[in-house]
Image: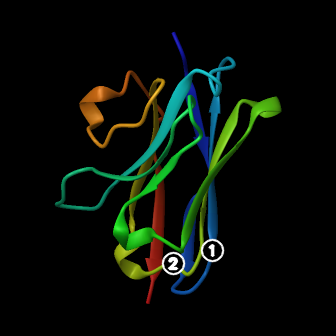
Amino acid sequence: EVQLVQSGGGLVQAGGSLRLSCTASRFILGRYAIGWFRQAPGKEREAVSCISSRDGRTNYVDSVKDRFTIDGDNAKNTMYLQMNNLKPEDTAVYYCAARRNFCSDYESAYDYWGQGTQVTVSS
């Protein structure tokens, strides 16, 4: 069993930055892929970014490329999603999730989920 605890998020003006954190209850970063998803009001949850444990590859949805960065701190069992140049359309509840080995864009493929954190970007 793995527990993921999220922190970060909040309210920011367009063009601003936020960093989301996702801390695992035990060391998983070497064996699990960590994905970030978001769900805006009235919309389906979408995959935003992911990093695979096996090869370190990162994926980003086109709408956040060159603005968001996913990385981690093994010593802290923590993954981060650095979000720069935020836009109002980034407003959503953000979730981190973990699954073994490789990334997936499908939320059903993930075994463990964080509690979610609200990100609100004002125009």
Q: What secondary structure is marked by label 1?
A: loop
Sequence-earlier tag: 2 or 1: 1
Within-10-Å neighbours for mark 2: few <14, some 14–19, many 20+: many
Q: Is residue 25 left or right of residue 34?
A: right
The image quadrant that residue 113 belongs to is: top left
Query: Residue 123: image x %, image y %?
Result: 43, 90
Q: Is residue 13 left or right of residue 43?
A: right
Residue type, label 2? Leu
In the picture, the disc for residue 17 is 1
Residue type, label 1? Ser
Query: Residue 50: image x %, image y %?
Result: 47, 46
In the picture, the disc for residue 86 is 2
Q: Is residue 94 above or below residue 22?
A: below
Q: Is residue 65 above or below residue 19?
A: below
The image quadrant that residue 48 belongs to is: bottom left
Residue at 53% in and 45% down: 57
Residue positioned most to the bottom: 123
Q: Is residue 6 left or right of residue 36?
A: right
Residue positioned most to the top: 1
Residue at 48% in and 24% down: 101
Residue at 65% in and 24% down: 30
Residue positioned most to the right: 75
Within-10-Å neighbours for mark 1: few <14, some 14–19, many 20+: some
Q: What secondary structure is marked by label 2?
A: loop
The image quadrant that residue 17 belongs to is: bottom right
Q: CA distance from mark 2 to mark 1?
A: 6 Å
Query: Residue 3: image x %, image y %?
Result: 55, 21
The one of 21 and 109 positioned closer to us in this rendering: 109
Q: Is residue 32 above or below residue 56?
A: above
Image marks 2 and 1: residues in contact by CB distance under 8 Å: yes
